[in-house]
Image: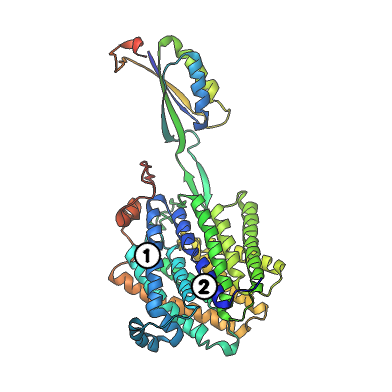
Amino acid sequence: MKMVVAIIKPFRLEAVREALHAVGARGLTVTEVKGFGQQKGHTEVYRGAEYTVNFLPKLKIEVAINNHLEDAVVQAIRNAANTGRIGDGKIFIYELSHAVRIRTGEDGSDAL
Amino acid sequence: MEAMPSELMIMFLGLLAVLVVPGFAMIEAGMARVQNSSLACLKTAMIFALAGASYALLGMNIAQHGLISGILEFISLVFGADAPSPEFFFQMLLAVTACLIIAGPVAERVRLWPLLFFCCIFAGVIFPVLQDLFITQNYLGGLGFSDLGGVNLMHMSAGIAALVAVKIAGPRPSRYADPQNSQAQDHALPGNNMPLAALGTFLLWIGLTALHSGAYFLQDLTFETAQLSRTILNAYLGSAGGAIAAFWLLTFRHGKADLTLVFNAMLAGLVSTASISIVAYPLLVFIIGGIGGILCLITVSFLDRLRLDDVTGAISIHGVGGAWAMLVAIAFNISGILGQIAGLILITMLAAGLSTIVLILIKASIGLCCSERASRHGQDAEEVGVQAYPQFEIRRTGF
């Protein structure tokens, strides 16, 4: 099993959700986060004085999937979250060692 | 349509002018950072109450009869019940407005109690003394000094008192770079709610326009109600001039128009055309308001260079706008050049001198500013106990 974590632009969430649903991912967790990447935020001007916005608002999505879905899910997120501009985000994939469904106690792939 | 009697107009415009109170509250609540936003509202409510009471109890006496007999009469007034003149409420609002002007620039660092204490003294003694000298007695009248019902006196003296307060209080922590550290940079500390600042600006616009128009009746009870349409239209055009000039200049220089500076310039345009809005041609008012707006922008950046941290821009709006309005009155033959310039200098010196004495005494006795820890943590938590937006738990921790 894999845990796919992606940082995306907030306004792409709906497109990403639809794309994930279409490839068969069955659950999705979304968190509002702030952070910076290669551009390290940007500067703005308030009352004539510059200030740096170091942390930009993003969404972090987490999807737990079976191994065979990995490529499809990554591709789906890439397609849906891509705007072609800087700050589109990143995808991280971890090995997922164990999963349990709380209500029934099902284990492993059955729990996803 | 039959015109309303002047006394009634004064009461009506005075009531409308109370909109300056929510105006100042919303501007400060929007332009302060989120952790100091509730205090801005509490502060405004208490200035409304205390400055008004202070002027009613003592200030009015001083404004009408001078400092000494004013204080002596204070006793008789508390125990007596003379029916107040129709202008009384209006004069009281001028004093309250002056205190609200002072409260904005020193936001986010000066504690509630010292500020309220200063406002009581400003509304109860300092402003009435100036009113007595320059309006009631008008010692400079022989030289040609005149002021529209004390409106420009109010704007200017409050702006100057605010400047003194900002100087004595010092800037907000981390606003300006540490001069010892060459790597450090100035940090703008953006306000938390721009739509609220916008709402406040327009409430203040209505309130100030009512205050300026009502001052014509205050100055001369035979003022024709029919002329009111002209003062209101001119007030509109003056502030339009200020906003357009600032918008153009900022867009030209930075590529973007800085929102709160456009608001500041709009109000500066309104303030700077107060005393000419009855005589000038609309196009001239528009241009004079535009110049007022640009003067306001220049002052904002000049104050920043001097490390004078004005949170809301009120020093630039009211201090500079009021002074500009006094000078403009010369060009329209409303006032004489000698008297007006002497008045400008004397008002500046008296307002600055008296405010400095009181503020230094306050600073030495009960202290003026909150601790740096309280400033970072937020005055809402320290002094009010209610956060502006309690359901947002993630707070900016920077700065």
Residue B26, horizontal then vertical, whole percent: 47, 56
Residue A23, horizontal then vertical, whole percent: 49, 14
The answer to which of B393 and A71 lies nearer the viewer is B393
Which of the chains bears the disc numbered 1? Answer: B
Which of the chains bears the disc numbered 2? Answer: B
Q: What is the crowding at mark 2: few (fewer than 14 residues within 10 Å), some, or many (at least 20)?
A: some
> What is the three-letter code of the residue carrying label 2?
Met
Instruction: Determine whether B278 is above or below A105 in the image.
Output: below
Instruction: Determine whether B297 is above or below B56 in the image.
Output: above
Q: Earlier in the sequence, mark 2 or mark 1?
A: 2
Query: Residue, x 58% and y 81% (percent of image)?
Result: B221
Task: Give the residue at mark 1.
Answer: B46
Residue B319, horizontal then vertical, whole percent: 52, 70
Image quadrant assignment for residue A98: top left
Give me the disc on residue B11: 2
Query: Residue, x 34% and y 81% (percent of image)?
Result: B78
- Label 2 vs label 1, nearer the camera: 2
Q: Secondary structure at mark 2?
A: helix
